[in-house]
Every structure is written in C-alpha cells, then in structure tokens.
Image (cartoon, helix red, strand yellow):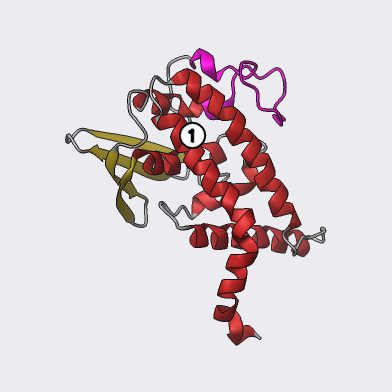
Amino acid sequence: MEEPLKIVYSYKFEDGYEKSFDLLIDRKDLGFIHKRNQAPPSWAELAKYRCENCALDSSSKYCPIAVNLADITEGFKDYFSYENVSVTVSTEDRRYAKDTSLQEGLGALIGIIMLTSGCPSMERLKPMVRFHLPFATLMETTFRTISMYLVAQYFLNRDGKPADWNLEGLKEIFTQVGIVNRDFAQRLLDAAKKDANVNALVYLDCFASMVPLSADKIMEEIKQYFSVYS
C-alpha cells in the first residue's frame, strides 16, 4: 500500500504552549484518512445542521467534514481567534512558517479537511490539496484555483467531453462552497466556547469568496507575464 500524503500543522502560542496535528491524505484519491476512535460529537450529526445544498444521502448519520474536524475543533475550543501564534506547516517536500493570528493559521488547516472529507460541494476543489500552499495571497490562490480548473477542463476535453474554457463553472463551485461555509459555521458555534474555530472558517470563507470576484482583475494584471505566448 502506498504511503499517504502527510501534512503536519504545528502551532506555538505566546506562552510557549504547542499543539500539533498530523493530517493523512490518501495519495490516490486525496481523501482524508480518518483516525478518530471516539464517537463523533452531537454537533456532527448530519440532520442537526444540514447544509442547504447538502447532497449526501439522508441515511448518512454524520456530516463527514464535522467528523474529521472534531478533534481539531476540540483542540481549539478554548482559544480566541485574535491570539498570536507561530505556525509551521511541514509537507513531504518542504516546510512553511508564519507568525500570524490563530484564525489565519487555523483557517488553512480547516480548509484541507473541508476539501478532502467527501462533501460533494467541496470535492471539485480537492486537487488543490495535492499542491497545498499555506498562507497564500489572494493572487496566488486565484492563480492556483484557475489553473486547477483549467487542468480539469483539459482532461474533459481530452476525453471528448464538453469543456468550460470561460470559467463559468468555477463561479458556481464557489457559490456552493459559500453555502457550505455559511451553514457549517452553525456547527462550530455549537462546538466551541470561544471563537477561534468559527472565525477561522469565516476568515477562510471571506478569502474564498474574493477569488471569483477578483479573478478577472487578477488575470488582467498577470496577462503581461504570458506575452511570450502571443
């Protein structure tokens, strides 16, 4: 069996306390490898805070994202989003580090789990996890997202299927992602005493919502970089 992809997020707080989370991702399908042994918490029940656009079978008892986020949510339930933290992200290829707010550092971690847990509305952004870039700027995220989407269209076109070269489908993807982020926040409000978890998701959602809004402008800005192809 092929070894899974491993991404480690480590957080060091100003008082010296440290937390570390090892994420294991299946190398073939980019699915999150679940390690939790305890029963999921009540706020993870699918029916309790079911997203408006949820496409999961009604026989499913739990929200897969909630199940995979349970340990992380528990770990940060007593923290505020504005707390300063040093974050180190280790992948099999390199390490990243940044001193930032907990909401930014935690948002990046939550994003990986939301894309890899099997939520139908989030799955189409899952390829980005294979080339995860923590703390990316809006320009970097927009470029990576559009590049990922166009690679998907290349494969569709190669297989003789209709391809969307005008990025119309990308806007719909982010519309559905926004609905999930909005509704999932209710679970996090139920799960934690303080605001680190929910504000990390809000931060993530605000950033994601800016991608389709800024795409045309950013693409126009970087067009000159591709003049050699003209």
Q: Which residue is mark 1?
A: 33
The quadrant in which residue 6 appears is top left
For residue 103, above or below residue 215: above
Identify the residue at the far left of this view.
16
Give the number of callouts: 1
State left or right for residue 223 relative to residue 42: right
State left or right for residue 208 relative to residue 91: right
Q: Is residue 60 magenta?
A: yes
For residue 188, above or below residue 25: above
Residue 146 % position (x, y): 62, 60
* Residue depicted at 52% across the width and 57% down the height: 141
* Residue depicted at 55% across the width and 30% down the height: 65
Which portion, as a residue range, is magenta? Answer: 40-66
Judging from the image, what secondary structure is the residue with disc 1 in?
loop
Residue 94 % position (x, y): 34, 57
Dominant secondary structure (helix, strand or loop) of the stretch shown in magenta = loop
Q: Is residue 168 magenta?
A: no
Q: Is residue 31 visible?
A: no
* Residue depicted at 59% across the width and 54% down the height: 211
Amino acid on which disc 1 is placed: Ile
Q: Residues within 10 Å of mark 1 (few under 14, many from 20)?
A: some
* Residue depicted at 50% across the width and 37% down the height: 202
